[in-house]
Amino acid sequence: MIKIKLCGLTRPCDIEAADELKPDYIGFVFSPKSKRYVTYEKASQLKDLLLPEIKAVGVFVNEELQNVAGLLQNGVIDIAQLHGDEDEDYIRRLRKLTDKPIIKAFRIKAADDVKAAEQSTADYVLLDSGTGTGTAFDWKLIQNIRRPYFLAGGLDVYNVALAVNKLKPYAVDVSSGIELNGLKDKTKMAEFTAAVRKEDKL
């Protein structure tokens, strides 16, 4: 089964919708520059509303190691997603502070980016077009990648079936594609989740 991650949740109603739809992961964005930014305190309140079987991912951009580790250790998040310039040394040092899973995001623009993702020591890699750009990259670049990955970047209910059918990623990650007027939309969340599950069964 291809996993589903609904990212950038900010409100209790977003969590309620996720609890109904039961994706494998949801995401909290801790980058202050993002319009989907939530504080650590807000994320903690939202996590209390989340079903325990749904894993909460914290999205960080060049965050202090201690802050990332603290949120993992306190159970506010279950997985750390590194979406900035964090290198192998950062990952190594984070592993000394926590044994929780790490996702490293890579912007895919050329074959060298795919090679870097393949060589990452993170538990998972996420392949994206940028930092929350809401646009897709050239999927041909990753047709022969040799490790499981989260596919992100411009996914929505209209193209996710093609992505699932063509690429068979480990997981699909959506944020702007399930929004209406800049906020998560329960109907779009449901349609996206249904489209992935329907295609996955074919």
Image (cartoon, rainbow, N blue to C red):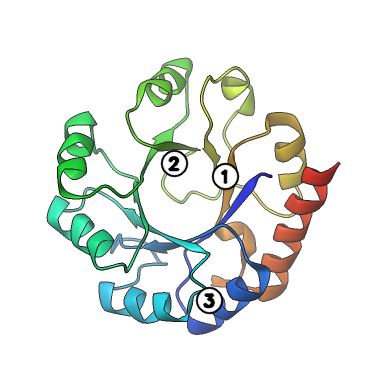
Q: What element carries label 2?
A: loop
Q: Give the residue at x 66% y 75%.
A: 20
User: Label 2 near label 1: C-beta < 8 Å?
Assistant: yes
- Mark 3 or 1: the one toward you: 3
**Height in image: 86 above or below 23?**
above
First in sequence: mark 1 vs mark 2 = 2
Q: Quadrant of the C terminus?
A: top right
**Height in image: 150 above or below 158?**
above
Say whether residue 86 is left or right of residue 182: left
Q: Residue 187 at x, y = what percent? A: 72, 72
- Mark 2 or 3: the one toward you: 3
The residue that disc 3 covers is 15
The residues tagged by marks 1 and 2 sit, at their Cα atoms, a distance apart of 8 Å
Q: What element carries label 3?
A: helix
Q: Quadrant of the N terminus?
A: top right
Instruction: Give the quarter of the image for residue 69.
Output: bottom left
The residue that disc 1 covers is 135
Residue 181 in view in this figure: no
The residues tagged by marks 3 and 1 sit, at their Cα atoms, a distance apart of 25 Å
The residues tagged by marks 2 and 3 sit, at their Cα atoms, a distance apart of 25 Å
Front residue of this view, candidates 115 and 74: 74
Badge 3 amino acid: Ile
Q: Give the residue at x 68% y 30%.
A: 167
First in sequence: mark 2 vs mark 3 = 3
Q: Residue 178 at x, y = what percent? A: 63, 63
Q: Residue 7 at x, y = what percent? A: 50, 60
The residue that disc 2 covers is 130
Badge 1 amino acid: Thr
Say whether residue 103 is left or right of residue 60: right
Front residue of this view, candidates 39 and 135: 39
Q: What element carries label 1?
A: loop
Q: Residue 161 at x, y = what percent? A: 77, 44
